[in-house]
Image (cartoon, rainbow, N blue to C red):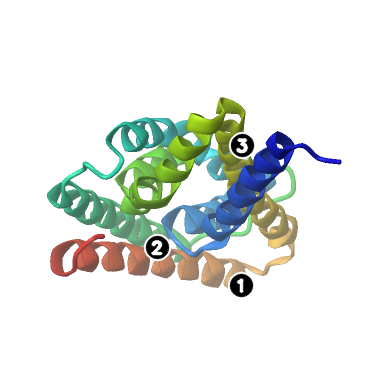
Amino acid sequence: MRTKREVARVTELLMGLSLGLGAGVTPGALLTLVITASLRGGFRSGVRLACVPLLSDLPVVLLAVTAVGALPQVLLRVLSVGGGLYVVYLGVETLREARTALPPRPGEDAPSSAREVLRGVVVNLLNPHPWLFWIAVGSPIFVSAWDRAPAYALAFVGGFYLVLVGSKVALAGAVGAGRHRLTPRGYRLLLGASGVLLAAVGAVLIVRGLLFPVY
């Protein structure tokens, strides 16, 4: 029979898994970058982008847990507009590339993995959604769990990032596996669609930051 401690730990883990799945499959700038990188460089390139939250979220989590809602509205607006402009730029750049792009040959990797990862880190840090999640949802759960036992808080965070990253890795695998079957026209259309989606996501971030409350 499970003890109360075991039940509590499993509860925090399941909560983290559920929230991580929602965050992992929700359309957004980083998910689109994962798709684009997988089209260009295959599964390994997509995985590198899928793991970006493990690199970029630490300052977000630390600040959010420390502040728990103290970040001013104006800072979130600046993040939204700045992130939106950068994502629009990436979308336009992808559209330009799509005009003459050719499907990658088997065994061919993306030209600059470090550059792709850096792009993903910048996009994630400028995206207000991770900040909002950890301020409004993640931090209260983490702090409450930590007060009961650090293991509960770690179970929540571990479950969250396991599924958040894992769902993007699964998508990278699906896209990367099928990219060599594409014709040049199909490849350009898919790459162009990724560019349009990036630009659209960026525009939404800009409009939200300028016209609507970010909370």
Which residue is at the front of the view, 77 or 70? Answer: 70
Q: Residues within 10 Å of mark 1 (few under 14, many from 20)?
A: some
- In the picture as drawn, the residue positioned furthest to the right comes out as 1
- Mark 3 vs mark 2, CA separation in Å: 29 Å
- Mark 3 vs mark 1, CA separation in Å: 38 Å
Residue at image position (41%, 39%) is 121
What is the three-letter code of the residue carrying label 3?
A: Gly
What is the three-letter code of the residue carrying label 2?
A: Leu
What is the three-letter code of the residue carrying label 1?
A: Gly
Residue 191 screen position, x and y as percent: 51, 64
Give the structural element (helix, strand or loop) at label 1.
Answer: helix
Residue 206 screen position, x and y as percent: 22, 63
Residue 129 screen position, x and y as percent: 36, 54
Q: Are marks 3 and 2 in contact (CB under 8 Å)?
A: no
Residue under circle 1? 186
Classify 209 as above or below 112: below
Give the structural element (helix, strand or loop) at label 2.
Answer: helix
- Is residue 89 visible in this depiction of the protein? yes
Residue under circle 2? 198
Residue 71 screen position, x and y as percent: 21, 43
First in sequence, mark 2 or 1: give its number.
1
Which residue is at the front of the view, 202 or 176? Answer: 202
Image quarter hosting the N terminus: top right
Residue at image position (42%, 57%) is 29
First in sequence, mark 3 or 1: give its number.
3
Residue under circle 3? 158
2 or 1: mark nearer the eye: 2
59 sits left or right of 84 in the view: right
